[in-house]
Amino acid sequence: MVMEPISAERAMQIAQKKGLSPGKVRGTEGIQFTKGENARLEVIGWDEFKGLLQTRGLQVYESGGWMKIMKK
């Protein structure tokens, strides 16, 4: 399957349907989606998530309902 870039708004819709929230990996600069059950991840708001995508030159990609955050 090909990973296609999607907007942060579309990622938010998909994440909400799956019970996911954006999160930062503690002690790193990593961001990912989480159910909030992992102590290594700090749940963040969508505005902060969008800002981190922009400042770090990242994009959310999707394929078949799977999402991944990668460099543009």
Image (tube, helix red, strand yellow):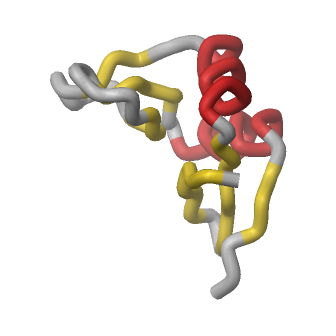
Residue plotted at (74% across, 39% down): 13
User: In the rendered image of this protein, does residue 66 appear above or below residue 51?
Assistant: below
Location of residue 66 in the rendering, given as x and y in whole percent from the top left corner: 56, 64
Q: Which of 12 and 19 is in front in this view?
A: 12
Say left or right for 64 vs 29. Answer: right
- Residue at the far left in the pictured view: 39
Location of residue 49 in the rendering, given as x and y in whole percent from the top left corner: 61, 22
Residue plotted at (60% across, 41% down): 15
Residue plotted at (21% across, 30% down): 38
Say left or right for 45 vs 62. Answer: left
Q: In which quarter of the image is residue 45?
A: top right
- Residue at the far bottom in the pictured view: 1
Location of residue 35 in the rendering, given as x and y in whole percent from the top left corner: 38, 34
User: In the rendered image of this protein, does residue 1 appear above or below residue 50?
Assistant: below
User: In the rendered image of this protein, does residue 51 appear above or below residue 15?
Assistant: above
Residue plotted at (72% across, 29% down): 54
Q: How many numbered marks does the figure carry?
A: 0
Say left or right for 19 vs 4. Answer: left
Q: Quadrant of the N terminus?
A: bottom right
Q: Nearer the viewer, residue 58 or 40?
A: 58
Q: Quadrant of residue 42?
A: top left
Location of residue 52 in the rendering, given as x and y in whole percent from the top left corner: 61, 23
Q: Quadrant of residue 32?
A: top left
